[in-house]
Amino acid sequence: MKKRMVRITGCLLAGALSIGSFGLNTYAAPVAGVSSVTAVEIAEGQTPAAGVSQALAQCLADSNDAAAQKAAEQAEQVSENDTPVVASEYTDIAIAQVDNYVNVRSEPNTDSEVLGKLYNNSAGTILETTDNGWYRIKSGNVDGYVKCEYVVPNDEELAKRVSTKYAKVNTTTLHVRTEPSTDASILTQVPVGDDLVVIDDESVEDWAKVTTEEGDGWVHKDYVDFNIEFVQAESKEEEKARLAKEEAEREAADAAANAARKKADRKSSSSKSSGSSKSYASAGSSNGQAVASYASQFIGNPYVYGGTSLTNGADCSGFVMSVYAAFGVGLPHSSSALRGVGYEVSLSNAQPGDIVCYDGHVGIYMGNGQIVNAINSRKGIGILSATYDDIITVRRLL
């Protein structure tokens, strides 16, 4: 009799099949990966008993369910193992850590042409790493090689410290609030397209703390787009143009300073001739106002890391140093060193011309709770709230 074979793999039907009454022959059929398998031969033309059919159906259903469950578990495991790693926004950033600057060269060797300078705390994007210890970087208009030993790559904490994060307004009018809540009062309103310096975008979910001319406030992250900027390398051509312009404009700056001093002296002489008395602080205030007024003439000019030109670009300490140099006062080109000049006064007693020192930054007090300062490469020389960041000390020289 011709027979039809039905193989049941991995199912033991013992007790469920009444094999003898249906002319069934059983034999062991080894299958790879299965230790005990029962194969059942059913004579053609015969119908298995209801119990057998149900057992077969149940076995196949259970087998399918088990296979589906195993596949799902494997898919879940693969999904967990293959979760893509999100790259940090500071990945492939190399930051110069040197006394002054490191040369960017045309080839990965010290005999090649110098294309530009990467000043301390300036950054570039790493494009390539050579076998002989050089990085090829792109920074501003400079594309060249720097020695690996003079830069620090992929250091997120350092990158955050030396960079400036901006929040660009992407809604018609953005409310800047006094607290990170839509129930908080509105500090100010900012139009679409304006950039705000970000102070903190991690401590409060969905909110970022920013600085404005009216003081520090909070904005909702849904209404701003973030971007990060670093001080970039200066090309050889850019440096040459900067130095030439600084030299040409030095005389004009000196002339303006002389005019400011003469004006302050005339006011002081006029007050003395009228019989009014002035304390040292008041006299200092007069001279300090001349300093603040002189410094304000350069608002809108560029920020250049390591620069000292009031017209072509200066960094924060270079700006303060050059302003005071016009009044015959020599100061160090260092924001930390400026914390020790003159004598300390409180912010509540600050007068125009006083130097306001922060961690890594410095500016000149203008009055009305504001400072004039070289902010960064994006903002240039401008005005900020004196309390935009924690003040370390306020120093008076005049």
Image (tube, grey):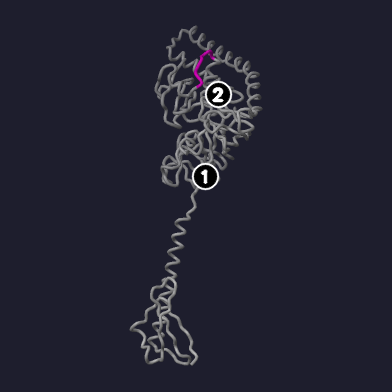
Q: Is residue 203 left or right of residue 237?
A: left
**Residue 224: image tag:** 1
**Residue 10: image tag:** none
Q: Which amino acid type corresponds to the residue marked 2 in the rendered image? A: Ser
At mark 1, the secondary structure is: strand
In which quadrant of the rendered view does residue 233 lie?
Answer: top right
Give the mark nearest the N terminus, 1 or 2. 1
Frontmost residue, 15 versus 2: 2
> In the rendered structure, are the residues bearing label 1 and label 2 in contact, judged by CB atoms less than 8 Å apart?
no
**Residue 296: image tag:** 2
Image coordinates of residue 372 in percent, x first then y, are 52, 26
Magenta stretch: residue 57 in it? no
Question: Which secondary structure type mostly characterizes the magenta part of the structure?
Answer: loop
Tell me, yes or no, if residue 54 can be seen here.
yes
**Residue depth check, mark 1 versus mark 2: number of the one nearer the observer:** 1
Frontmost residue, 39 versus 393: 39
Magenta stretch: residue 330 in it? yes
Frontmost residue, 42 versus 94: 42
Q: Which amino acid type corresponds to the residue marked 1 in the rendered image? A: Val
